Image (cartoon, rainbow, N blue to C red):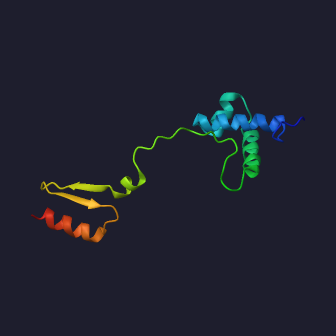
């Protein structure tokens, strides 16, 4: 069996591609194998073997990069408040990191008004 430029065999690269396709499919490994006319246990074995070869730091060699759009600055997101609207019509602005017991006591008092 010949080796590819990254050191894996052609067969290994074939199963890497199949397993990446399976991951994108959103189906079970068994359903994916059946639909493709493949043996489920063979795919499961390759999945196990390739998982053991994966980098130990959690990074994936084959992980594609995806575009990201930042919608707010982290400092703005951390400072955002909650607004609690009660049936009584009261509105309570609650900062992040609030004390849950104090909020519960306040809501209980306002609900009784």
Point 76% across, 40% down: residue: 42
Q: Is residue 100 above or below residue 23?
A: below
- Estimate the x, y position of residue 36 in percent, counting from the top left: 69, 28
Q: In the picture, residue 24 is in which quadrant?
A: top right
Task: Give the quarter of the image for residue 66.
Answer: top right
Q: Nearer the viewer, residue 49 or 70?
A: 70
- Residue 100 is situated, as x and y percent measured from the top left of the image, at 30, 68
- Residue that protrudes farthest toward the right in the picture: 1
Residue situated furthest left in the rendering: 113
Which residue is found at the position 12% from the left and 65% from the top? 112
Q: Quadrant of the N terminus?
A: top right
Which residue lies at the image location 29% right of the left edge and 56% below the top edge? 81
Q: Position of residue 11 (x, y in %)?
A: 82, 35
Q: Quadrant of residue 71?
A: top left
In the image, 85 versus 36, the foreground residue is 85
Q: Residue at x 59, y 37 (%)?
A: 27
User: Would residue 69 appear left or right of 54 to someone viewing this image?
Assistant: left
- Foreground residue among 25 and 64: 64
Residue 53 position, x and y percent, is: 76, 50
């Amino acid at each position: 069996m010949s080796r590819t430029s990254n050191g894996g065999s052609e067969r290994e690269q074939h199963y890497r591609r199949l397993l990446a396709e399976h991951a994108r499919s959103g189906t079970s490994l068994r359903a994916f194998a059946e639909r493709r006319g493949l043996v489920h246990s063979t795919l499961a074995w390759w999945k196990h073997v390739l998982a053991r070869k994966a980098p130990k730091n959690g990074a994936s060699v084959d992980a594609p990069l995806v575009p990201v759009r930042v919608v707010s600055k982290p400092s703005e997101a951390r400072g955002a408040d909650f607004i609690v609207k009660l049936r009584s019509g009261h509105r309570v602005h609650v900062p992040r990191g609030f004390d849950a017991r104090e909020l519960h006591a306040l809501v209980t008092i306002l609900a009784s008004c």
